[in-house]
Structure formats: C-alpha cells, structure tokens
Amino acid sequence: MPPQSLLLLGGTSAIGLATARRLIARRTRTVWLAGRPSPELDAAAASLRALGAGVRVVPFDALDTDVHAERLGRVFAEGDVDLVLLAFGVLGDQARDESDPAAAVRVAQTNYTGGVSAALVCAGALQAQGHGSLVVLSSVAGERGRRADFIYGSSKAGLDVFAQGLGDALHGTGVHVMVVRPGAVRAARTAGRPEPAPLSTTPEAVAGAIELGLRRRSETVWVPAPLRLVASALRHVPRPLHRRLPVAP
C-alpha cells in the first residue's frame, strides 16, 4: 500500500517533489517538507497542498548536524512516518571545487556527512515505531570515479555504501531501506550543463521507479533499469580506457 505519510528531506528536490506528487495521487495525505527556509520551499509546500495533502514545513540544513535529532525528532513525535525520502544533495562545480578545498569539503559534508546524520536519526525513529521505509537517493556517479565529477561521485559512493550497510543492519526490524541510483537527471539543477548522457532520466521517471520499488520492497533501484548493466560493464573497463571514454553514465 502507498504510504500515508512522507517526510521529504530536501524539500525543494525535483525528484522528491515528483515523488510526493505521485504518492499524493495514490494515498499519501501528510507530507513534511524538510529544507532550508526559502520562497522555493514555501512554493513547494503550497503546490502540494493544492493537490489535497496536509503539508508542514520543517527547517532543516544538511550541514547543521548538531540539530538533526531535535528537528527531525519533532516530526516523528507528531505521529508515525511511513516513508522517509532522503533527496537532498549538491552537485558542486568540479573545476571550481578542485581548486577550492573548502568548496569540495562542503559538497562532501552535504552529500555524505549530512546524509549519514539524517539517515541514522530517521532510521532510529522508524525502528522505534516498528515500520516504515527509508529511501536514499544515490547516483550512478558513485559507481566509479570519473574525471568529470569525482568529488560529487565520491560523496555519493560513500552515501551508497552507508545506505546498503544500514539496510543490512535494519533487516528484520520492519524497516525497509532502498537505494535509488539514477543516471543523469534532466531537471532545473542541470540547466546550463552539457547535454545529458544517453541513459539519462527525469524526476518523474525516478518517482515512478521509487513507487514501484516500494511496492516490490526492492533494496536497489536503477533508473533507467538498463543502466545497471551498463554500469556493471563499465566497472570492469581497464582504467586507461575508462578515462578516455567521452561519456560514462
């Protein structure tokens, strides 16, 4: 059954909001949008309310890990949460970040450290209530280091391995952990960047794959599905050849 309640970590995420819209059309009636206060976050909340959901905005900053337990704990104190979708993250700017270690650290701390902190807080709360799903948005960029985006990719690789292990740790507790690995996503955040790879996807397609994965209780979801085979093949390409490939998922 679709979840009745959703906590979206990354309240302005295109994938997160596409998933929320899809779930509201099915059964979801309560949504918490967690993110940094902004007009964009308020507009996202208003758009979901217009679909008939009860929406609450929760101040949340991935980098402010000291208050994650307190801020997210308030959500769970109001009632059970059926689904937590960890959808926040930053792409960064590879060229700039290579020459600015502080900027590179910010990417790593947002995507990995912030993800670890928020996921553990939510996993503990889900385990305490005895049910629920935690969906973690990873990326195919974390499968193998690439010259074009190895700072972002390495942060997603760390989050991916963490989420896999967390899923194993929670196995048998009633809590389901699912890792989602999209290819390049055609969304506003990629505007101005090079044309996406052939196996790119959209927020709506990822949302559909998330919904299907939840129904199937999947542990790993690739979007689009053929990307799994491509990534598996590329994993075994010799490194000198891999670094010369013009496009890699």
Image: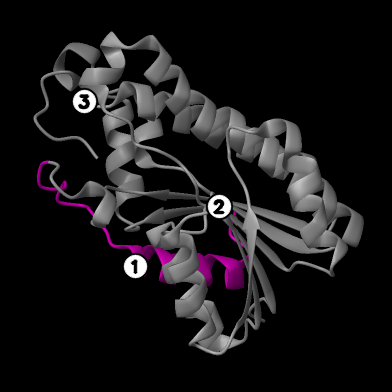
Residue 202 on the magenta span? yes
Q: Earlier in the sequence, mark 2 or mark 3?
A: 2
Q: Amino acid at mark 1?
A: Ala
In the rendered image, the vertical position of residue 185 relative to residue 100, given as above or below:
below
Residue 150 visible in the displayed image: yes
Q: Please name the residue shown 32% across and 46% down the image.
A: 229
**In the image: residue 36, left or right of residue 184:** right
In the rendered image, the vertical position of residue 25 relative to residue 148, given as above or below:
below
- Distance CA(mark 1)–CA(mark 2): 23 Å
Closer to us: mark 2 or mark 3?
2
Residue 172 visible in the displayed image: no
Q: Tell me the residue that label 1 is attached to.
A: 205
In the rendered image, the vertical position of residue 52 relative to residue 232, given as above or below:
below
Residue 157 on the magenta span? no
**In the image: residue 231, left or right of residue 48:** left
| Start-end of magenta stretch | 194-219
**Residue 20 position in % (x across, y down):** 51, 72
**Residue 175 position in % (x across, y down):** 77, 56
Q: Tell me the residue that label 3 is attached to.
A: 148
> Front-most of 196 and 245?
196
- Distance CA(mark 1)–CA(mark 3): 24 Å
Q: Please name the residue shown 16% across and 46% down the image.
A: 197
